[in-house]
Image (tube, rainbow, N blue to C red):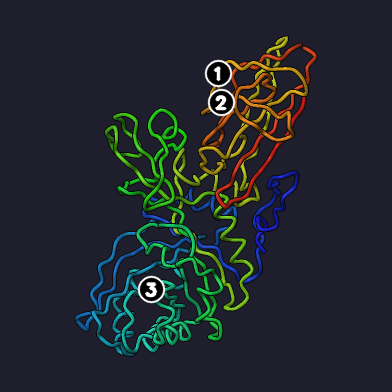
Amino acid sequence: MLLFLLLSLACGGVQPTPGVVERSPGRKLALWVRSDFSRDDAQRLKNVGFDEFVVYRGVIDLSAGAPVLRLVAGPELGPGFIQTPVLGLKTGGLGLNANNAEVLWSALKGALGSTSRGMILDIREIPEGIGEFIADLQRVSGVPVIPLLGSEQLSDLKVRGLVIQAGECIIPLYGVSGPGFRIPSSRNNLGLRKTLEPLKETGVRVRVGIGMEPLFKPELKSWGGDLDLLLGPLAEPVVAKQLDRAFVFRKDCSWGGRNWVRGDRLEASWMDASRLAAAFRESDRLILPELSGWDLFGAPPQGKIVGLDREGLLAFMVGRGPAPEILILHEKRGRSHRIRVVNRSPFASALSKQGQWLEVSIPAGSLVVRGGGSFDGVVLGSLRSGRWTPGMSDRVDAVRFYEDYIGPGEEIETGAITLPSSRTGLNATLRILLSDGREIRRQASW
């Protein structure tokens, strides 16, 4: 079992556990990468548990009978790394046979490289004879041929025959996008077991695909920019119409490799550590069909991006996260206090307009607040009744500082809080939301 699946909720939050990822024997962890992926990148990710690196290498076109290969270069990682090609298969609706497999392999074998221990075929058309073709291709090549399929294809009887011949398949089930591959958006909220039910009695092993790259509308060429910057001076969160989140730009600016004009709208969905942990947690419980591993579609870059960045992925793989690691620090000068919230991790909170706050209260008397500091908003209120009541009254004994999003490594500070006397006690409660719906609370008193 993966180590980060063993993380438990304690004191209202997810506690990190140190150590490299452990998992059941036979379960493979593969990372799908682009051509700019380097040997140094591969070494760092191999050190934290990745077994295999998958690279898109082009298209096999059999629609004219004879194979036409349209190949692209992949990274040369060299000895010590398993590097598997993924190839799109086009047939134009033509049936396939053993002769197709032999002719294809004679044309293909010199292009795959010596570090490959198999190949992955992205099969979007399901022609007659596809199962026998896969079996023959495995026989003549001597390596596993693993089909990449969409969950909507599993109800096709020809697909069931195909996967039985292959013995294993890859199904994208989580996340939203990947490096040039099919989007895992066809799950239709059926749930994992219901989605994979057509494979239950086949004996086929399944590798679960998880899309790591964010999806944007309009499309961006990169993984986006700093989400915290977007939420600060550049844009305002609004109700999404197509994807998970939407933003309207407040001013003309450049963000995410694109120029924006005031009033432009951006929608986005992304994978963060909390959603990644939930995907592993759910799929790890799969019994039938048997789980044979995970394929992460996309190696995130370094630096501040939308979603989980490279350092975040590395930290996650050694057992940290998925929640932010928070310190609540206190500074006092006489009757004046400031509280600082520090995220010491590469993991972020969810994005929530009103659900995340630092609540500060005193047991008696009234307090005075001078501004929200670096928080996104501030509301005065009272806890006199035992529950939070916003608004001005004859006694303000509590205040909430709201924060839409706590980014990796972010620090935020309250405005000055003045208490009735220098001896007055101060209580603080921090509420953070994770994107999988869980809530974390941290408390402190001085």
> What type is the residue that disc 2 sits on?
Val
Q: Is residue 33 above or below residue 444?
A: below
| Residue at the (55%, 55%) spot, across then down | 276
Asked if labels 1 and 2 touch by Cβ distance under 8 angstroms, the answer is: yes
Q: Residue furthest top?
A: 334
Whether residue 218 is visible, yes or no, is yes
Give the CA separation, mark 3 to mark 2. 54 Å
> What type is the residue that disc 3 sits on?
Leu
Q: Position of residue 8 (x, y in %)?
A: 72, 53
> What type is the residue that disc 1 sits on?
Gly
Tag shown at residue 371: 1
Query: Element under label 3?
Result: strand
Query: Element under label 2?
Result: strand
Badge 2: residue crowd in 10 Å (few <14, some 14–19, many ≥20):
many
The residue wearing badge 2 is 378
The residue wearing badge 3 is 121
Locate residue 135: give its quadrant.
bottom left
Q: Is residue 20 above or below residue 388?
A: below
Left or right: where does residue 91 sit relative to residue 389? left
Whether residue 78 is visible, yes or no, is no
Locate the N terminus by quadrant. Answer: bottom right
